[in-house]
Amino acid sequence: MARCIMSPLDITVEELESLMDTAMDIMGNPDKYAHACEGKILATLFYEPSTRTRLSFEAAMLKLGGKTLGFHSADSSSATKGETVADTIRVMSQFADICAMRHPKEGAALVAAEKSGIPVINAGDGGHQHPTQTLTDLMTIKALKGNFENLTVGMCGDLKFGRTVHSLIKALVRYANVKFIFISPKELMIPSYIRDDLLIQNNIAFREVTKLEDVLPSLDILYMTRVQRERFFNEEDYVRLKDFYILDKKKMDLASQHMLVLHPLPRVNEISSEIDGDPRAVYFEQVRYGMYIRMALILKLLNVNV
């Protein structure tokens, strides 16, 4: 059975180190990898809109010399005719060598993985998991900080529905002495399965606060998130909370000169464009690291050695 990646925890700490080493080598020696996946096809099955993730996967495969096919919304797939995810992946297994899937329903990627004849990478399922965004985040931190140990990580914004936040927390708790500060309005606090079952259960240090300014000086990493309109049942709640946190120059002046600002993107207005030129604002570099770590993951799942 083909190996599939549903969660960041499907990748061991040792494998993660190896993936990041490969990604760094690709960055330094792109020509060495330019034909590594010649003759291979990546299927991108995106049942909900995405720009960065889908194009990052496609760019990764193209830069490895492979090809891509797929669809970018459920409306442009046979899902409109009632075809199941299980049947779609069975069909795609006849065309492609590897698949990246995004779906609004939690667990959809797992259904695909169980029926697939090719490796499936979960590119986001509902509010659940988004493993390659986590790989992107980890790659960015490792490249710019050098390690994961002894960091104080602030996570700000939508911590209730933010799948990128949940996945990153699960990945970081595997490293020594990582402390978390969760910054959110009470309506968007981290869910109990993260707080109780993961952090408290494993004696991981964390604090929950509502004011960003109070904790900025103590952070090594600030992970900003947008308040996601698509996760709200109620437009009134979304409007009330969407501008709760806006990171601007005045707030950045409170932070350490060594703090990094990450964001999974897209941003709406939670990060002011006036800080885009600040060397601590690394969210666009983060996108570039994401492509390279996806290239490394594709190579690993296809068992391609360069």
Image (tube, rainbow, N blue to C red):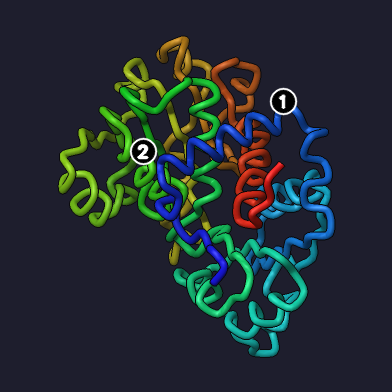
The amino acid type, in three-letter code, at marker 1 is Gly
Residue 243, relative to residue 85: is it above or below?
A: above
Q: Which residue is drawn at 53% across and 69% down?
A: 109
- The one nearer the camera, 194 or 141, is 141
The dot on residue 103 is: none
Judge the density around disc 1: few (<14), some (14-19), many (≥20) Cα neighbours within 10 Å: few
x%, y% of residue 282? 58, 26
- The one nearer the camera, 234 or 278, is 278
Q: Which residue is outermost to the front?
A: 305
x%, y% of residue 155? 38, 36
Circle 1 is placed at which residue position?
A: 28
The amino acid type, in three-letter code, at marker 2 is Leu
Circle 2 is placed at which residue position?
A: 172
> Is 15 on the left-hand or right-hand side of 207?
right
Examine the image and state in which quarter residue 233 appears: bottom left
Q: Nearer the viewer, mark 2 or mark 1?
A: 1
Q: Residue at x 78, y 47 (%)?
A: 36
Q: Residue at x 16, y 45 (%)?
A: 200
Say which quadrant the C terminus sits in: top right
Say which quadrant the N terminus sits in: bottom right
